[in-house]
C-alpha cells in the first residue's frame, strides 16, 4: 500500500471512530481529501485508494489536475471499479472565475456574497445545470476571515433561494487556527446550532462542512457531514 493510501485509511478510521463515539452513523460523514499543492501523482494514488471527494482551493489548480483523474475515471469505468472521485471547491472563489468553476465542481463550499451567488446562478443557467454550494460562515466573526457573519446567514439563504440555478445545501466554516481541537469545538457546536436553526426555518441544511487535519474528530463529534483534510493525508505543504 502507498503511504498516501495508508494515511487515507488512518484518517478514515479516525472519522469512523469519532462518529461512533458521538453515536452517529459513520456513513453520515464524508471525507474531502484536500489536494491543494499536492502533485497529481499523489492525487491519483488517493483516488486509487478510494478517495471519493477531492478538495481544491483554486479553480485553475483543480482544472490542471482533472485530465489525469479523468483518464483514471475512464480506466476504472472500463474495469467496472467503483466511481472515481468528484471535485469540491473549498477556497475563496472570485466572481470572475465563477464561469470556469460552475459545473466543474460538485459542490462549492465557499459562497460568501450575494454578488457571487448571483454570478454562479447566471453561469449555471447558461450551462443548463444546478450548482450546489455551501454558505461559508465567519463563525468567530474575525475581521480578516472570509465568510458571512452568523447573524446574517438566515437573510442570505432567504435571498439566495430566489436563484433557480444555485442550490444552497448547508454551511461551511474555517474557525480560527488552533493547535488544540478543543479550541475549535465551541465554533463547531455553534455551526451545528446555526444549521439546526436554519433547518427549522425550512432551509436545506443537509451538509455541514467543518474540521481539518488538526480538529476533524471534534468536528465529527459536533455534527460535521464533510471534513476537509489535507496535511494528515498528504503531509505538510511546502
Ligand atoms: C487547506 C485547507 C484545508 C485542509 O487543511 P489541512 O490542515 O491541511 O487539513 C481545509 N479547508 C480549507 C478551506 C483549506 O484551505
Image (cartoon, rainbow, N blue to C red):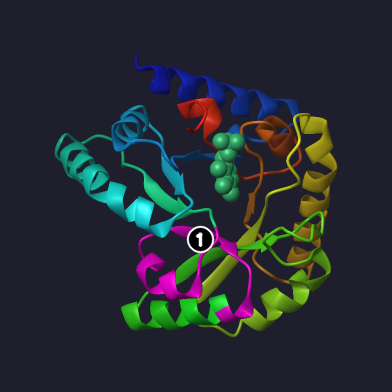
- Residue 91's place in the image compared with 16, above or below, is below
Q: Answer left or right for 160 relative to 127.
A: right
- 223 in magenta: no
Task: Count the labels in the image.
Answer: 1
Residue, x 52% and y 28% (percent of image)? 236
The quadrant of the rendered image in which ligand 1 is seen is top right
- Residue 116's place in the image compared with 18, above or below, is below
- 113 in magenta: yes
Q: Answer left or right for 132 relative to 193.
A: left
* Residue 40 horizontal/vertical position (percent): 31, 37
Q: Is residue 165 visible?
A: no
Which region shows up in magenta?
A: 92-115
State yes or no: Cβ of the residue under disc 1 lies below 8 Å from any atom of ligand 1: no
Most distant residue in the top direction: 1
- For the residue pair 201 and 191, the one nearer the viewer reads as 191
- For the residue pair 188 and 94, the one nearer the viewer reads as 94
* Residue 233 horizontal/vertical position (percent): 49, 27
- Residue 198's place in the image compared with 77, above or below, is below
Residue, x 22% and y 49% (percent of image)? 67
- Residue 72: image quadrant is top left
- Residue 116: image quadrant is bottom right
Q: Answer left or right for 179 relative to 227.
A: right
Quadrant into which the N terminus falls = top left
Element at label 1: strand
Q: Is residue 87 visible?
A: yes
* Residue 78 horizontal/vertical position (percent): 14, 39
* Residue 133 horizontal/vertical position (percent): 54, 64
Q: Answer left or right for 28 relative to 87.
A: right
Q: Which residue is mark 1?
A: 108
- Residue 150: image quadrant is bottom right
* Disc 1 residue crowd, few under 14, some 14–19, many 20+, Cα 10 Å: many
Residue, x 74% and y 32% (percent of image)? 23
Amino acid at each position: 500500500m502507498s503511504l498516501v493510501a495508508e494515511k487515507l485509511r488512518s484518517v478514515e478510521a479516525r472519522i469512523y471512530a469519532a462518529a461512533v463515539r458521538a453515536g452517529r452513523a459513520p456513513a453520515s460523514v464524508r471525507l474531502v481529501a484536500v489536494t491543494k499543492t499536492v502533485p497529481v501523482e499523489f492525487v491519483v494514488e488517493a483516488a486509487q485508494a478510494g478517495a471519493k471527494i477531492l478538495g481544491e482551493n483554486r479553480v485553475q489548480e483543480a482544472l490542471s489536475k482533472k485530465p489525469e483523474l479523468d483518464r483514471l475515471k475512464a480506466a476504472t469505468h472500463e474495469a467496472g471499479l467503483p466511481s472515481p472521485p468528484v471535485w469540491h471547491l473549498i477556497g475563496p472563489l472570485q466572481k470572475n472565475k465563477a464561469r470556469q468553476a460552475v459545473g466543474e465542481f460538485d459542490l462549492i463550499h465557499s459562497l460568501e456574497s450575494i454578488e457571487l451567488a448571483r454570478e454562479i446562478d447566471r453561469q449555471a443557467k447558461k450551462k443548463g445545470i444546478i450548482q450546489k454550494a455551501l454558505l461559508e460562515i465567519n463563525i468567530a466573526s474575525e475581521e480578516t476571515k472570509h465568510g458571512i457573519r452568523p447573524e446574517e446567514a438566515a437573510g442570505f439563504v432567504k435571498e439566495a433561494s430566489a436563484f433557480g440555478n444555485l442550490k444552497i445545501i448547508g454551511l461551511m466554516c474555517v474557525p480560527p487556527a488552533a493547535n488544540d481541537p478543543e479550541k475549535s469545538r465551541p465554533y463547531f457546536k455553534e455551526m451545528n446550532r446555526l444549521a439546526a436553526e436554519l433547518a427549522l426555518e425550512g432551509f436545506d441544511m443537509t451538509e455541514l462542512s467543518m474540521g481539518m487535519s488538526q480538529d476533524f474528530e471534534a468536528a465529527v463529534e459536533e455534527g460535521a457531514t464533510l471534513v476537509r483534510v489535507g496535511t494528515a493525508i498528504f503531509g505538510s505543504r511546502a
